[in-house]
Image (cartoon, rainbow, N blue to C red):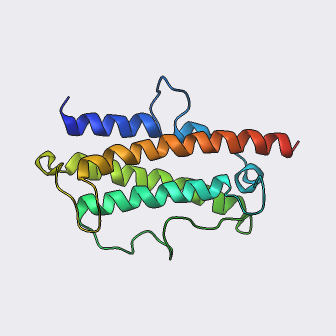
Amino acid sequence: MNELQLLRHHLDLAYAKKAWHGPNLKGALRGVSLDEAVWRPTPERRNIREHVVHASYWKYSVARRLTGAERGGFGEPGSNWFERTRNDGAAGWKADLRRLDRIHAELATAIDRFDPSRLNEIPDGSSTTFRDLILTIASHDIYHTGQIQLLKRLAREALR
């Protein structure tokens, strides 16, 4: 396994492959209802849906840097955090989950096609190397998985 394949493997473990550390991001989202996805511990805190769209956005951002694509392809205005409520119903929640899957697949493809001799380069608009972008986007999934697991437990207790 070369370094790029190892980075891709780490991304897969953080998102959907079985890992020793417990749930990955996709596993943490399995079975989350719309009510749980939009529940907030306090009005000013983020909900699970917002974590999902945030994770999607940063996967998109890393894939865009790997491929050299122009900004603006995420599909909605803004960056980083996107407010989510129950206004668009279960269909909106499912669309957010589908987008996460689609963008993850696009990121995986971008990594598979990336020239490993460029891992030490710093892309335009970034302060870190391509290597660190790939490594830390996987870590970003793990970080938000923990937050989602906590929010899910709190939501399930509060919504009983």
Residue 88 screen position, x and y as percent = 70, 68
Q: In which quadrant of the rendered image does the C terminus lie? A: top right
In this picture, residue 85 sits left or right of residue 57: right
Q: Residue furthest right?
A: 160
Q: Residue furthest top?
A: 20
In this picture, residue 7 sits left or right of residue 144: left
In this picture, residue 156 sits left or right of residue 143: right
Locate residue 147: give its quadrant: top right
Q: Residue drawn at (28%, 55%), measured in percent from left and top?
A: 128
**Residue 29 appears in the figure:** no
Q: How many marks?
A: 0
Q: Residue drawn at (29%, 60%), measured in percent from left and top?
A: 127
Residue 45 screen position, x and y as percent = 70, 58
In this picture, residue 55 sits left or right of residue 12: right
Q: Residue drawn at (73%, 63%), measured in percent from left and top?
A: 44
Locate residue 139: give its quadrant: top left
Q: Residue drawn at (73%, 48%), measured in percent from left and top?
A: 33
**Residue 109 appears in the figure:** yes
Q: In which quadrant of the rendered image does the N terminus lie? A: top left
Residue 115 screen position, x and y as percent = 14, 50
Look at the picture and state if 23 lies above or below 35.
above
Q: Residue furthest left?
A: 117
Look at the picture and state if 75 lies above or below 47.
below
Look at the picture and state if 101 lies above or below 84.
above
